[in-house]
Image: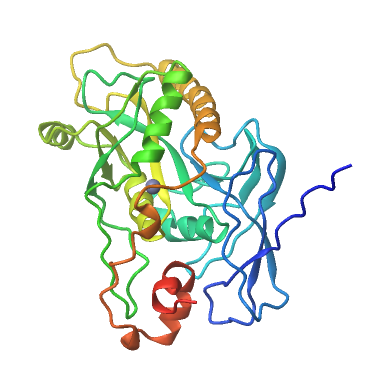
Amino acid sequence: MVAPEPLPPPAVGYPLTAARSRPFILIPCVATNNQAPRGRPQRAGAGQGVFLQQAEIGIIGGSGLYSMPGLTGIHEERVTTPFGDPSDAFILGDLEGRCVAFLARHGRGHRLLPSELNFRANIYALKKLGVTRILSVSAVGSLKEEHKPGDFLIPDQFIDRTFLRVSTFFGEGVVGHVAFGDPVCSTVAGVIVAACATEGVTAKPSGTYVCMEGPQFSTRAESNLYRSWGADVIGMTNLQEAKLAREAEICYATAAMVTDYDCWRQGHDDVTVEQIVAVLHQNAANACRVVKSAVAAMPAERTCACASALQHAILTSPDAIPQATREKLDLLVGKYLDPR
Ligand SMILES: [Zn+2]
């Protein structure tokens, strides 16, 4: 009889509080088809700390998607961050043989406005869990006739129309500028596009997403302005996630689910509430199948540039970075400031 392969030792990370004496310990991913990297290398001197279950793929569910059917071995994890609390507890489990962490973007019960979301805490917490890829799902309005309610679109560009949000981990004595010309990970975007095809969901493989502040929808003048810019869809949440995921060196892409035509499309029959609800339900059901399919198809290795996005991004001289900031950002930038 062949002895089972022993599990690798727990990976050890450090919380970004000043308390380096309280490391957290990542319990390695043990999903049935686990291909996840085994977390951060073990560091000497780690004592007793907070145990966290490691995840490989993060799923952020938006309007209509508040849970992830099909998850097995579910474990709820509340993750603390130096930026405050994430939207909710993370639901960790096995999906298609991979370790995933699911977060309801607006909290279970949809309690948080787009402007109230703590995007930094959400992305930081996923980094802390060991996530290297994020699949985001969100509801959007269509700015073009050809993007019909029920269609999915995988944005590859964004226009920022928000004004009440913090969209960076940097500051407090450290300056970083990441490249953002290609704001989503082409690998993850490609996997989502292919998953839509597999599941028979109509999907556009690219397009521009206008991220507005909300919570009100656009005025007609705004909607027509965005159309004149050539934008495809409009939503309220995805751009901050994309920016922060890039700074956290996490691959990110989103499945934008069209629910309506925003307000520009006059002269057509009014849409009933029943029709909107039906589209929301259909989109959520499609999103579950697409996410499952995408998780199953996600390549094990990362060959994109996302994992080294910060390599040349930090302009501040290491000597000039305040110690408190250095410790706060250790999980994100420590390997560049203090190589071990
Ligand atoms: Zn990537």
Q: Residue 91, percent across and down? A: 63, 46
Residue 279 versus residue 8 in the image, above or below: above
Q: Residue at x 32, y 48 (%)?
A: 239
In the picture, the quarter occupied by the N terminus is top right
Residue 166 visible in the current orientation: no
Quadrant of the image occupied by residue 230: top left
Q: Residue 80, percent across and down? A: 58, 65
Residue 327 versus residue 150 in the image, above or below: below
Q: Is residue 209 left or right of residue 129?
A: left
Residue 206 visible in the current orientation: yes
Q: In this view, does 274 lie to the left or right of 85?
A: left
Q: Residue 59, percent across and down? A: 51, 42
Q: How is the image coloured?
A: rainbow
Q: How many marks?
A: 0
What is the residue that sits farthest to the front in this orientation? 1
Q: Residue 166, percent across and down? A: 34, 62
Q: Residue at x 41, y 48 (%)?
A: 251
Residue 287 versus residue 215 in the image, above or below: above
Residue 177 vs residue 45, the one in the foreground: 45
Q: Is residue 306 left or right of residue 89?
A: left
Q: Residue at x 36, y 55 (%)?
A: 246
Residue 17 vs residue 100, the one in the foreground: 100
Residue 106 vs residue 193, the one in the foreground: 193
Residue 310 vs residue 122, the one in the foreground: 310
What is the residue that sits farthest to the left in this orientation? 228
What is the residue that sits farthest to the right in this orientation? 1
